[in-house]
Amino acid sequence: MFRLKKDNAMKYSKALLDYFKSSPKVPTTPPIWSDSGKGTGGPPSSLSPSPSALTLGSSPSSLISIPQRIHQMAANHLNITNNVLYSYEYWELAESLARDNNEFFNYLNTLSGPLTLHSSIAHAVQYTRQALQWIRISANVG
């Protein structure tokens, strides 16, 4: 299912990332709440924001109020999702390159063990160092 929706997910993720990068930051002060018209500044007696909080220079239909906590959670979730999307894309690119250089990677896998999505960091570092060492040797010889 992921592979079917990956292109759309990448497109949406990029659009949302661009939006969150360019959107104005949500103010750190809480919205003005009506407390039965008293404006005491205490906790709201209802969950309805006062009209003044909704109409700060625009019509109520064009302003959407998002709590800072929710906005931050959405931005964080987007970053995590974006990292997952790109990790799959890079993994698929790496698999394609490995197929193109099959002999090199078969020998590396025999010596170091195959690198998988579940490999430890230590194994990934050891695998990469071995591959880079061979590439340096090959570059010096050739």
Image (tube, rainbow, N blue to C red):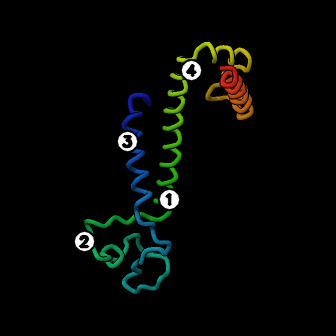
The structure residue drawn at horizontal position 54% and vertical position 29%, both measured from the top left corner, is 91
Residue 98 is marked as 4
Q: Position of residue 77 (x, y in %)?
A: 50, 49
Q: Nearer the viewer, mark 1 or mark 4?
A: 4
Q: Answer left or right for 9 relative to 43.
A: left
Sooner in the amino-acid sequence: mark 1 or mark 4: 1
Identified by mark 2, the residue type is Ser
Secondary element at tag 1: helix
Which residue does the image show at 45% across and 65% down from the upper left?
67
Q: How far apart in space, not on screen, are marks 4 and 3 (Cα)?
A: 27 Å
Distance CA(mark 1)–CA(mark 3): 21 Å
According to the picture, the residue beneath numbered tag 3 turns out to be 11
Q: Residue at x 41, y 46 (%)?
A: 14
Name the residue type under label 1: Gln
First along the sequence among labels 3 and 2: 3
Q: Quadrant of residue 138?
A: top right
Give the mark, 4 or 3, whose residue is nearer the N terminus: 3
Q: Residue 114 is drawn in which quadrant?
A: top right
Return the mark for residue 59. Answer: 2
Nearest the viewer among 71 and 36 is 71
The residue under label 1 is 72
Give the SS element for disc 2.
loop
